[in-house]
Amino acid sequence: MSSTANESARQQEAHLALQIDHFIGKHKGELIRDLQGLADSYEIGKVSERAPLKNVMSVANEANSDPEEVINFIRYQLGRSTRNEIWSRQSKGNQPKNVFADELATRIENLSKMSDKILESILKNVSVKVPDRDQVHIKLIRLYLGYLSRYHTYLKWAYEQERIKGGR
């Protein structure tokens, strides 16, 4: 391949990466609202340890990570005899009676639908090679888990403030 062809290929890849980020950016609000609803319904702020979510984020952030690998890791955490309490938390109210780990895995699987929408948008706006669906899906998973971890930090603080005010 000539240097001109290599440069053209690199430019196309860079343009595609920008398009992926652009269209993912249009869905960030939807991602954040979904994970906040999840976190609130399972009251994960009552679990003070951050390591479980950080560990899942580490799996998702591995260079060759795959959506199924992340889902498998979450389910593995639930199955461990020494699992952290966050994974087996029950939802409050009239929410589905799945434990947190199962619901998180389901929501991560469902991000594939958002991946499809993003790919459709890219196809309509760009005439370049279509990215792999898993490439977009894993980027969404990384964002979802990152924002979930941040929101968990806030919820822990809010729960502690509530406990202090309540004198417990």
Image (spheres, rainbow, N blue to C red):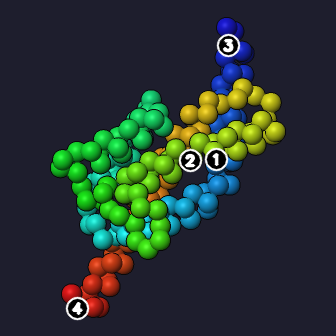
Look at mark 2 in the image and give the residue it sits on.
110
Q: Residue at x 56, y 34 (%)?
A: 134
Look at mark 4 in the image and give the residue it sits on.
167
In the rendered image, which quarter contains the N terminus? Answer: top right
Q: CA distance from mark 2 to mark 3?
A: 41 Å
Residue 85 is drawn in which quadrant? bottom left
Q: Residue at x 75, y 28 (%)?
A: 128
Nearer the N terminus, badge 2 or badge 4? 2
Look at mark 3 in the image and give the residue it sits on.
3
User: Image height check: is 34 above or below 94?
Assistant: above
Q: CA distance from mark 4 to mark 1?
A: 44 Å
Mark 2 vs mark 3, foreground winner is: 2
- Residue 104: x %, y % from top left: 44, 53
Residue 100 is drawn in which quadrant? bottom left
Helix, strand or loop under label 2: helix
Label 4 crowding class (10 Å Cα cut-off): few <14, some 14-19, many 20+? few
Q: Are marks 3 and 1 in contact (CB under 8 Å)?
A: no
Q: Are marks 2 and 1 in contact (CB under 8 Å)?
A: yes
Label 2 crowding class (10 Å Cα cut-off): few <14, some 14-19, many 20+? few
Q: Are marks 2 and 3 in contact (CB under 8 Å)?
A: no
Q: CA distance from mark 2 to mark 4?
A: 41 Å
Numbered circle sitting on residue 114? 1
User: Image height check: is 121 above or below 16?
Assistant: below
Q: Are marks 3 and 4 in contact (CB under 8 Å)?
A: no
Amino acid under label 2? Answer: Asn
Amino acid under label 3? Answer: Ser
